């Protein structure tokens, strides 16, 4: 797999990268994967030496963590007598170099770009974030990115500025965007045919480690014909706790609620948004009732949004990271539910979406 036309590629010793990244501070804050106990988490760091690039997965997805925080203030209203004043909270404009994002999580950011293309808070962060991806080498047993075409390696495409590939003592660095080319002055050897072959071999090796698979051919239409399949209630009634972990760790879940919090003197109100979750019992509570009262209906909504509603953004809602399976306390697995429907389709008339 070659770099895309116009993309600069170099082979650079791994030890040269931290010095280069640190030289970009303080113009760019640095964030990336760091070890925390037995886990890896994405965090801001003071030095590139703190990063752990050969990680497997993180509980919180980097895109949401840095571009779409779990709570965000939007507006403040102040009233005094007859007068009222409305003030927007400013969008964050600090520049961040977000390093070490896996292919699945880059695809999730591209998905969020579609959702929040008009959102000033998201856009300001996105435009000020230089996204340097790394091709994944340590898939978890829950990963199924190779089935949905989002990994483990990135294809030349949109959504990221540069991508690293771990080739032993060296990184293959592909600089995709102009701003990455301007900012990351990476010294290294020119990349010849042998390096592209090593990259292709590395990708095949990593693909071989991915054990979870899902056949997505025709899956969206099949699921839509099976909204009343027994797998929904059998799984939900016996195992779903409505804890919403699956939504919280999902890199593409974008639902949020907007709340006005009024102070005790009734003079100042802060409007903020915070993540919401269709797995939460109150999510579908509206005037006059709740249109998803059962756990089965809520579980089905989550799974359908990941695997079925491809028309919404012209892609599946899942990027195959497997976090919803890994962090579900009862290990409910959307790929297993899909396989159960593929094994015994009911072909019932579909409900409205
Ligand atoms: S799966 Fe549920 S919480 Fe996630 S984006 Fe869809 S409706 Fe929202
Ligand atoms: S994490 Fe598992 S148990 Fe919790 S709401 Fe999601 S599917 Fe249900």
Image (cartoon, rainbow, N blue to C red):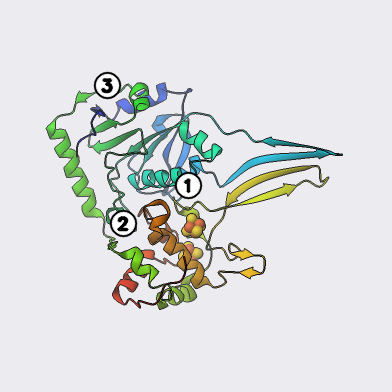
Note whether ligand 2 is within 8 Å of mark 2: no
Q: Which mark is residue 144?
A: 2
Question: Under tag 1, what secondary structure?
Answer: helix
For marks 3 and 1, the one nearer the N-term is 1
Pick out the residue farthest to the right.
Answer: 81
Q: Report the Cα–Cα distance between label 2 and label 1.
A: 23 Å
Question: Under tag 2, what secondary structure?
Answer: loop
Residue behind mark 1: 115
Say which of 293 and 211 sits in front.
293
Q: Is residue 348 left or right of residue 77?
A: left
- Residue neighbourhood size for the residue with mark 1, other residues' Cα within 10 Å, grouped as few (<14), some (14–19), many (≥20): some
Q: Is residue 163 left or right of residue 207?
A: right
**Residue ID at (31%, 77%):** 344
Q: Answer above or below: position of 158 versus 293.
A: above
For marks 3 and 2, the one nearer the N-term is 2
Say which of 51 and 102 sits in front.
102
Of the 4 image quadrants, the one containing the N terminus is top left
Image location (x, y in percent) of residue 123: 50, 36
Say which of 352 and 210 sits in front.
352
């Amino acid at each position: 797999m070659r770099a895309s036309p116009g993309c600069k590629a170099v082979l650079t010793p791994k030890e040269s990268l931290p010095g280069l990244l640190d030289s970009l501070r303080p113009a760019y804050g640095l964030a990336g994967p760091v070890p925390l106990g037995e886990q890896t988490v994405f965090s801001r760091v003071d030095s590139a030496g703190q990063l752990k690039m050969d990680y497997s997965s993180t509980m919180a997805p980097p895109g949401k963590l840095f571009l779409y925080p779990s709570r965000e203030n939007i507006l403040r209203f102040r009233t005094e007598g007859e007068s009222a004043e409305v003030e927007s909270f400013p969008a964050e404009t600090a520049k961040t170099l977000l390093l070490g994002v896996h292919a699945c999580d880059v695809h999730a950011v591209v998905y969020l770009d579609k959702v929040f293309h008009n959102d000033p808070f998201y856009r300001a962060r996105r435009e000020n974030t230089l996204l340097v991806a790394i091709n994944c080498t340590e898939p978890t047993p829950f990963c199924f990115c190779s089935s949905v075409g989002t990994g483990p390696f990135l294809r030349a495409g949109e959504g990221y500025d540069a991508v690293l590939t771990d080739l032993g003592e060296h990184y293959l660095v592909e600089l995709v965007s102009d701003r990455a080319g301007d900012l990351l002055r990476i010294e290294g050897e020119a990349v010849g045919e042998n390096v592209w072959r090593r990259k292709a071999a590395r990708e095949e090796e990593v693909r071989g480690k991915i054990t979870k698979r899902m056949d997505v051919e025709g899956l969206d239409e099949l699921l839509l014909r099976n909204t009343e399949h027994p797998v929904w209630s059998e799984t939900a009634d016996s195992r779903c706790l409505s804890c919403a972990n699956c939504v919280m760790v999902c890199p593409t879940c974008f639902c949020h609620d907007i709340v006005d919090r009024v102070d005790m003197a009734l003079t100042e109100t802060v409007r903020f948004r915070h993540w919401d979750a269709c797995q939460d019992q109150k999510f579908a509570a509206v005037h006059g009732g709740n249109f998803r009262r059962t756990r089965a209906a809520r579980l089905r909504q989550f799974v359908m949004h990941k695997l079925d509603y491809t028309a919404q953004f012209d892609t599946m809602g899942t990027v195959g990271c497997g976090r919803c399976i890994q962090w579900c306390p009862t290990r409910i697995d959307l790929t297993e539910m899909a396989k159960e429907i593929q094994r015994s389709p009911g072909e019932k008339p579909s409900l409205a979406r």
